[in-house]
Image (cartoon, rainbow, N blue to C red):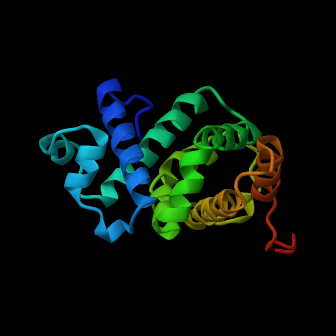
Amino acid sequence: MLISSKINPQVRRTYEWTFEALMLLLKEKEFDKITIKEITNKAGIARQTFYRNYVDKNDIVQKYVDIIFSDFVKHLDGKIKSLDMCKCYFDTLKKYQQSLIELTQFYDSEVIYKTFSKYLDIFAGFLKQNNLPKRSDAFPEHLKKYQIMYQVGGAIFITAEWVNRKMKTPVDKMANMLETISAANYFHDGND
């Protein structure tokens, strides 16, 4: 699922207001105890606006992650090197640092990273480009898709650890680390 880098500005504002309202309410009570009415009142939106934009409360988090990845895709445009992609990824996440850190404190972080994994196609599409150096030539064609999934899964876990550590490691260091790890094929010993 490649997403568009454009979200209607009015819809984006609704997503942001609703997410901010949810975050404020999460500081007061558990997610399961928050009502749609409380969210809409806090966000200053009508109930019908909520249901026009969301399926349920969990969808608020999904739509917010959509905003983050929309920004990522927009900034990814024209990047042709894996290090540039990694830097773009961590730069984009860093812009949402406070929200991501708070979200993982008050909301099920496993759900957040499963949401991130829905964007596997963005990463996979980039990694399949012909102009990237490939160590995956040792893999049969039918396994390359799984190798990419494996690498992206690792990137998601690295992201989770970075957010859990309050994103203190600089973006450049994270990008270099992810690019180095992605370029290495730890399990391949060179003997076919």
Q: Residue furthest front?
A: 28
Residue 29 in percent (x, y) is at 39, 66
Q: Which image quadrant for residue 118?
A: bottom left
Tell me which residue sits at (25%, 53%) in the image.
38
Seen in the picture, residue 82 relative to 162 is either above or below; the reply is above
Residue in the foreground of this view, choosing between 142 and 132:
132
Residue in the foreground of this view, choosing between 110 and 72:
110
Tell me which residue sits at (76%, 53%) in the image.
178
Q: Is residue 52 toward the left or the right of residue 88 in the image?
A: left
Residue 140 in percent (x, y) is at 64, 66
Tell me if residue 2 can be seen. Answer: no
Tell me which residue sits at (57%, 63%) in the image.
149
Tell me which residue sits at (36%, 31%) in the image.
7
Tell me if residue 158 can be seen. Answer: yes
Quarter of the figure with the C terminus: bottom right
Q: Is residue 48 toward the left or the right of residue 143 in the image?
A: left
Q: Is residue 72 toward the left or the right of residue 59 in the image?
A: right
Q: Is residue 29 toward the left or the right of residue 72 in the image?
A: left
Seen in the picture, residue 149 relative to 91 is either above or below; the reply is below
Residue 36 in percent (x, y) is at 22, 56
Residue in the foreground of this view, choosing between 17 and 76:
17
